[in-house]
Image (tube, rainbow, N blue to C red):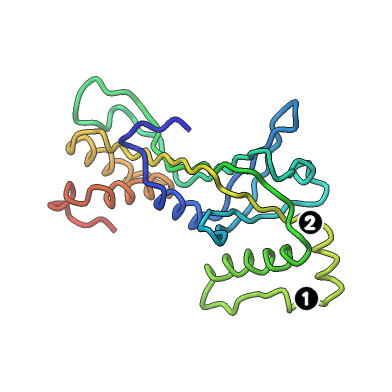
Amino acid sequence: MYTPPPFKPDRAASLGFAEARGFGTVCAWDGRKPVASSLPFYLSASADGTPQAFFHVARGNLLAKLANGTTSWLLAVSGADAYVSADWYVSPDQVPTWLYQAVHLTGPVRILSEAELGAQVDALSAKFEHWLLPKKPWTSDKMSAGRLEAMKKAIIGLVMTVEEVEGSFKLNQHKSEADFVAVAGALSDQADTSSQQIARLMREARPDAFAGEINRT
């Protein structure tokens, strides 16, 4: 991942972003072309603290045949993004750009055992059911044993040992305070939630720049 220094988050921030997002695109190489799938995941750590990304794919997915435990895969995780018009800057001679957050996790992937798969399915659903609180979480024990086993046989559990963590949080950090505030304000006025989210992230990144501004709702 190409990341200019002003946009580079630290390792902990990158992993925290990926875990909070919980959805990304997994990509592997089959010897001729890239193979990719978009899927949910969760992060954990091995006994020595090495990050691990757990996910699963349909048994018929080509990715299941490429998990040899040695070849590196890529898990690309994206967040909000927004177009920035050059007209929004205070300074002259600016160009349009795109602001975004993204993290790439890279490492070898192996197939989970049957017992590991059961734990992975439960942990993955628990992660996202937690988002729905105070709804009572769904758990796999609500399914009949036969149906649950049939569903598990239709998938392959996978785990990536994360050897490299790369991030790019491009939020115009390199711009002057006046330009930074102007762009954040313009993004706040856009109708789409992604632009508004980028504006909130910009305010969180440089709160002092907005100290004299009336709070936006």
Amino acid type of disc 2?
Answer: Ile
Which percent across, then down, holds residue 138? 65, 75
Q: Secondary structure at mark 2?
A: strand
Amino acid type of disc 1?
Answer: Met
Rate crowding at label 2 as few (under 14), some (14 to 19) or many (20 or more) other CA atoms within 10 Å: some
Q: Quadrant of residue 173?
A: top left
Q: Residue at x 68, y 41 (%)?
A: 70
Which percent across, then down, holds residue 127? 57, 66
Q: Which mark is residue 112?
A: none
Q: Secondary structure at mark 1?
A: loop
Q: Is residue 133 left or right of residue 70?
A: left
Q: Which mark is residue 155?
A: 2
Q: How far apart in space, not on screen, are marks 1 and 2 (Cα)?
A: 16 Å
Q: Which residue is mark 1?
A: 143
Query: In the rendered structure, are the residues bearing label 1 and label 2 in contact, judged by CB atoms less than 8 Å apart?
Result: no
In the rendered view, would you say 81 is above or below 56? above
Which percent across, then down, holds residue 217? 29, 58
